[in-house]
Amino acid sequence: MASPSAHLSFLAGRTSPHFSSERLRLSPYRRELRPPNPKFRCSAGQSGFFTRLGRLIKEKAKSDVEKVFSGFSKTRENLAVIDELLLFWNLAETDRVLDELEEALLVSDFGPKITVRIVERLRDDIMSGKLKSGSEIKDALKGSVLEMLAKKNSKTELQLGFRKPAVVMIVGVNGGGKTTSLGKGNIDIRKLAHRLKNEGTKVLMAAGDTFRAAASDQLEIWAERTGCEIVVAEGEKAKAATVLSKAVKRGKEEGYDVVLCDTSGRLHTNYSLMEELIACKKAVGKVVSGAPNEILLVLDGNTGLNMLPQAREFNEVVGITGLILTKLDGSARGGCVVSVVEELGIPVKFIGVGEAVEDLQPFDSEAFVNAIFS
């Protein structure tokens, strides 16, 4: 378990803006480092099929509270000390109690900036007489975390615009659970396809992971299991951008609602592979104006705050519109969710709390806060 000092050293000296002059000067992707073009952003207020679909999926989170609750058992264990500290709280022990509360938050990967902000706010409210009991302090703590999430995480439902097909690209590093999310074997693609299909959506998958020989086979299996069609590469040397372009063209011609585009897992430090993502994004945009509607980055929740540099690089290269946090199955430290949202200002769309297709849960801020502060 990382110590608080390790957390502090990790983020020491980092600045929050994504497009600082320093990063523009040093990054090998400098020609792409500009605020994402508005045409790649979907407005949340569009009416019609896709808006209803996004809201419907989000509402499903209300019935999945038990799975979310079980997914953050490790975080609750780390934060259980807070209840003990506040049980017999008195004003004379404020400093000691807040110091231990601060340590518990750091251990749960809330990050130093967020932790200090929360603790100092509690200290001010205690000293001013606004908080007079342990239960009031606990409620204020939960309220602070919920406020942070609600402020920067407002668009948690899928933003799919108003044209068909909507195009969703799934990106991420190797081993983060990207393929399964969409529909293959790891976590997010197959699970997202399962959710969309269950809402009556006509889904087409695109096997854009052309580096792994087994990737297309995996996705074909999951496409069959979820009742979705799939477009795969023709030939061993097919480019990912070509596969995605072909899929989106078919989606447009055959009236599909959503095209889910898988991509190869890649290290955020690999220049050539990150350049390929730019090509994929441009390729689908040439077929459908405004596509991709969503570019979802899959992050492994077990990496804690180490996910932040990955997210920064992917965001600077292709403009991430939402996050899928996976492997939050009891061992991860849930404070990383708050850290990512606060640091990057990118909404969390889904969280993965298990291996089953039903375990990709729409993110709900209130359910999350209740799950980690039982």
Image (cartoon, rainbow, N blue to C red):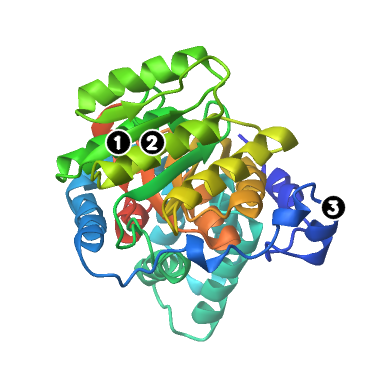
Residue 231 appears in the rendering: yes
Labels 1 and 3: the sequence-earlier one? 3
Residue of label 3? 26
Residue 68 appears in the rendering: no
Labels 2 and 3: the sequence-earlier one? 3
Q: Nearer the viewer, mark 1 or mark 3?
A: 1
Q: CA distance from mark 1 to mark 2?
A: 8 Å
Circle 1/circle 2 CB separation < 8 Å: yes
Q: Position of residue 69 (x, y in %)?
A: 29, 44
**Mark 1 crowd level (few <14, some 14–19, many ≥20, 10 Å Cα):** many
Amino acid residing under circle 1: Leu
Residue of label 1? 204
Amino acid residing under circle 2: Ala
Q: Which residue is at the front of the view, 181 or 97?
A: 181
Give the residue displayed 72% in from the left and 43% down from the top: 6
Q: Which residue is at the front of the view, 347 or 194?
A: 194
Q: Position of residue 199 (x, y in %)?
A: 16, 46
Element at badge 2? helix
> Residue 372 shows which numbered tag?
none
Give the residue displayed 38% in from the left and 59% down from the top: 87
In the image, taking residue 262 as reference, residue 231 lies left or right, namely left
> Residue 247 shows which numbered tag?
2
Q: Position of residue 364 (x, y in %)?
A: 32, 56
Q: CA distance from mark 2 to mark 3?
A: 35 Å
